[in-house]
């Protein structure tokens, strides 16, 4: 056996059985003296009986309750405060003994089995992999079932199971991918059309939402989206089209305005509408907006004015309110760089699809399979695939049909769908795949595979160079999008729709800006290696005009997100007070300190709260505003079975109560019940909500520290910057390896934090340290 494959601590475990036995004796004696009353033969709180726990710590399921015991003893929660307490030295000795035993037991299991399991590509990784492999842009993720989350992420191997339904979808997705790659026939003609928005002067839309100027410029006053579809153009085929729109802000008192553009069929029962983007428009002076967008077959576009309301007037000719003027629209496409397309040539080379031979199929598969399997492939793995083509040809199928059988088998093979790793250190190609799916959510490119082929990828200098190269590549945007989308729950931004009566100022542009702010903030930390303590508090925010208005911060104009210094006294800064996080931790109508508190414990502090006891009803917020959530929770916390956990969960939630469900700062709750009327109109309509009870955002933390508000809470968290960094490092390690944290990973995280401390726990440094860690480099 190669001794380099054996972790030194595993060797120590084998060499010191007497110490292991001594540790067990020390731990059991401590538990018998201090814990038997609540977890012994006569009483078993929470269903836990300690005297019968098996000491088999290399078994994951049997080690789990011992880990819980260690964490409770270390935190000073076991034995409970009301019971006699052991000496601090005794507590530490027992905790150290149990920690070492659990660590060595977990390492022994990892030596035997490996840390991770075979991991299936999640549906987004699958789509990206097919994209890079075949040079096709097909929304294959939409064809596959949603992946199961575990440890907060959708790339965890143990949760990515395979069902008969998934296999059927993979067959459908492979057909869709090959249909796109093997497109044939004449090159679609590229056309350019220049039209006005209104079909003719008597267009009914003029009476509902528009005004037509003598030069055929159309003024859009109404944001009712069914009125402004460009009917004069329909895309002949699906593909990319260049859009050019001459437009300007109209009757806006010299101020710029915003227009959105949407694509789709805009037909009943066809759900393919997509946002192309939002665009700034100057006042009164036409500006040409140019953008490339994907249109479906028979698709078109729809421009909409922003924040003009959806009112109807019998006569718009004298209306003096703001609107968007559109002079003309020009559409060019489909845009085709080459024909046959790159996908066809990448797959077939110079082979004629209508006259190919078995030798041609063998040559195609020899080129295709190593790229699909992301490693060198010996001949014995190619032969069965060629045999599939041979049998199909002998049954009278055409060359294309027979070749598709072989290609489809590759796209449904375990070697394509899974990241297959062997125990011990990862081989160079497996390491290349782990690295690329971490930073790109996509397969290794030719440069990374070339380094893997040289066998030098695991060398610290080499892998660092590759990480830097990959982070500079535009494909690394997938890391920012997918990691923040799951760690910070940004993917849930659409899960709730704020109540329009309580929060009439909420709109789609604000929601889009919320997500962009958080992604840009993460990217700023990553690009400049800023400390992850900025997650808790920063002296800057990533804002555009819509967000700055929402936050009450002056001096930011336009749609572009940019780094903005925060003014003195601002409550913003960091992730906790970003509108995206505040929205995904609320239900659209009310906020819950319990939900937000549990989120902070898990996502920011890395100390998740246990699940609630069974048969304990959740607190239902009083939407009429007669009772605050604090008053309701006070009664809830009086229950003994609830108090222990709520003492941890509620304080981080209480300090966020100054922020409503869309992240607006508030000193009073909004209510639809009794309260003070609000003299405010939004888009010409008086708001219906009233000012309700005052917000109390104070809290007492578990250690007795009192915080008056979110600002003091942030400072309390920053007193332990290493814990903040530990949480981020743990999330990175889970995401990077596609596996939940094991007990032995605790020491690995401590080691990489020690190495990252000199950079003040810079985010880019943490990424490098994760990749350089033995945990990342081994199965």
Image: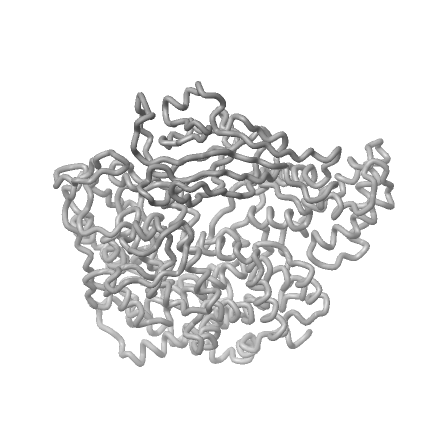
Is residue 701 positioned above or below 227 on the image?
Answer: below
Residue at 65% x, 37% y: name it: 176
Percent x, y of residue 6:
61, 74
The image quarter containing residue 207 is top left
Which corner quadrant holds the N terminus?
bottom right
Is residue 213 positioned above or below 285 on the image?
Answer: above
Percent x, y of residue 561:
41, 54
Q: Is residue 377 visible?
A: yes
In this view, the residue farthest toward the top is 202
Is residue 704 positioned above or below 26 on the image?
Answer: above
Q: How is the image coloured?
A: one colour
As rendered, which of 314 and 334 lies closer to the eye?
314
As rendered, which of 439 and 109 lies closer to the eye?
439
Q: Is residue 419 left or right of residue 380?
A: left
Q: Is residue 113 visible?
A: no
In this view, the residue farthest toward the front is 214
Q: Is residue 720 left or right of residue 218?
A: left
């Amino acid at each position: 056996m190669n001794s380099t494959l054996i972790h030194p601590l595993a060797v120590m475990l084998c060499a010191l059985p007497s110490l292991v036995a001594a540790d067990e004796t020390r731990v059991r004696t401590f538990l018998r003296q201090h814990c038997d009353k609540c977890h012994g033969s006569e009483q078993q709180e929470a269903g836990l009986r300690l005297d019968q726990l098996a000491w088999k710590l290399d078994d994951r399921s049997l080690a789990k309750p011992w880990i819980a015991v260690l964490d409770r003893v270390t935190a000073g929660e076991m034995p409970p405060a009301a019971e006699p307490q052991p000496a601090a030295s005794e507590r530490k000795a027992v905790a150290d003994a149990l920690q070492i035993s659990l660590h060595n037991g977990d390492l022994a299991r990892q030596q035997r089995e490996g840390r991770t399991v075979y991991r299936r590509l999640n549906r987004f990784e699958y789509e990206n992999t097919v994209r890079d492999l075949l040079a096709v842009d097909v929304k294959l993720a939409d064809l596959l079932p949603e992946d199961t989350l575990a440890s907060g992420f959708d790339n965890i191997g143990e949760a990515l199971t395979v069902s008969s339904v998934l296999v059927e979808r993979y067959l459908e997705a492979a057909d869709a991918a090959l249909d796109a790659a093997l497109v044939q026939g004449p090159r679609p003609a590229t056309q350019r059309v220049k039209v006005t928005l209104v079909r003719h002067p008597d267009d009914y839309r003029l009476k509902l939402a528009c005004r037509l100027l003598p030069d055929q410029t159309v003024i859009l006053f109404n944001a009712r989206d069914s009125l402004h579809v460009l009917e004069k153009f329909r895309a002949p085929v699906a593909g990319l089209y260049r859009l050019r729109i001459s437009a300007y802000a109209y009757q806006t008192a010299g101020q710029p305005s915003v227009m959105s553009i949407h694509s789709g069929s805009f037909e009943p029962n066809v759900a393919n509408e997509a946002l192309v983007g939002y665009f700034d428009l100057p006042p009164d002076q036409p500006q040409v907006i140019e953008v490339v967008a994907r249109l479906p077959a028979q698709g078109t576009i729809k421009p909409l004015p922003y924040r003009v309301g959806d009112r109807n007037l019998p006569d718009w000719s004298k209306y003096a309110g703001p609107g968007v003027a559109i002079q003309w629209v020009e559409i060019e496409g489909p845009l085709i760089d080459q024909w046959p397309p790159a996908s066809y040539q990448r797959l077939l080379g110079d082979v004629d699809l209508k006259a190919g031979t078995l030798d041609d199929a063998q040559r195609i598969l020899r080129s295709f399979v190593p790229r699909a399997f992301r490693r060198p492939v010996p001949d014995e793995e190619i032969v069965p695939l060629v045999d599939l083509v041979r049998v199909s040809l002998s049954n009278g199928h055409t060359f294309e049909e027979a070749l598709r059988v072989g290609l489809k088998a590759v796209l449904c093979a375990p070697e394509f769908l899974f990241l297959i790793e062997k125990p011990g250190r990862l081989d160079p190609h497996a390491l290349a795949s782990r690295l690329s799916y971490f930073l790109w959510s996509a397969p290794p490119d030719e440069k990374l595979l070339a380094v893997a082929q040289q066998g030098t990828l695991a060398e610290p200098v080499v892998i660092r160079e590759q990480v830097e190269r990959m982070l500079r590549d535009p494909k690394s945007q997938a890391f920012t999008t997918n990691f923040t989308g799951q760690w910070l729950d940004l993917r849930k931004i659409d899960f709730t729709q704020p109540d329009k009566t309580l929060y009439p100022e909420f709109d789609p542009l604000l929601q889009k800006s919320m997500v962009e702010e958080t992604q840009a903030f993460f990217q700023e930390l990553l690009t400049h290696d800023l400390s992850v303590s900025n997650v808790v508090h920063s002296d800057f925010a990533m804002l555009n005009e819509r967000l700055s208005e929402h936050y009450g911060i002056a001096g930011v104009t336009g749609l572009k997100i940019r780094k903005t210094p925060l003014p003195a006294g601002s409550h913003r800064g960091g992730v906790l007070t970003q509108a995206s996080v505040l929205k995904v931790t609320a239900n659209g109508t009310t906020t819950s300190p319990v939900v937000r508190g549990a989120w902070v414990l898990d996502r920011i502090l890395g100390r998740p709260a246990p699940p609630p006891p069974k048969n304990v009803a959740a607190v239902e917020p009083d939407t009429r505003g007669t009772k605050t959530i604090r008053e309701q929770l006070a009664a809830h916390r009086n229950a003994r079975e609830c108090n222990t956990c709520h003492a941890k969960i509620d304080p981080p939630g209480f300090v966020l109560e100054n922020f409503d469900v869309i992240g607006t700062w508030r000193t009073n709750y909004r209510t639809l019940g009794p309260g003070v009327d609000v003299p405010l109109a939004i888009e010409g309509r008086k708001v219906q909500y009233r000012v309700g009870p005052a917000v109390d955002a104070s809290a007492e933390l578990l250690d007795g520290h009192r915080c008056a508000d979110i600002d003091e809470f942030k400072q309390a968290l920053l007193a332990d910057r290493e814990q903040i960094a530990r949480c981020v490092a743990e999330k990175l390690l889970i995401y990077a390896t596609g596996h939940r944290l094991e007990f032995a990973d605790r020491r690995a995280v401590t080691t990489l934090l020690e190495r990252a401390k000199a950079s003040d726990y810079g985010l880019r440094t943490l990424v490098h340290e994760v990749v350089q860690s033995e945990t990342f480099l081994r199965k």
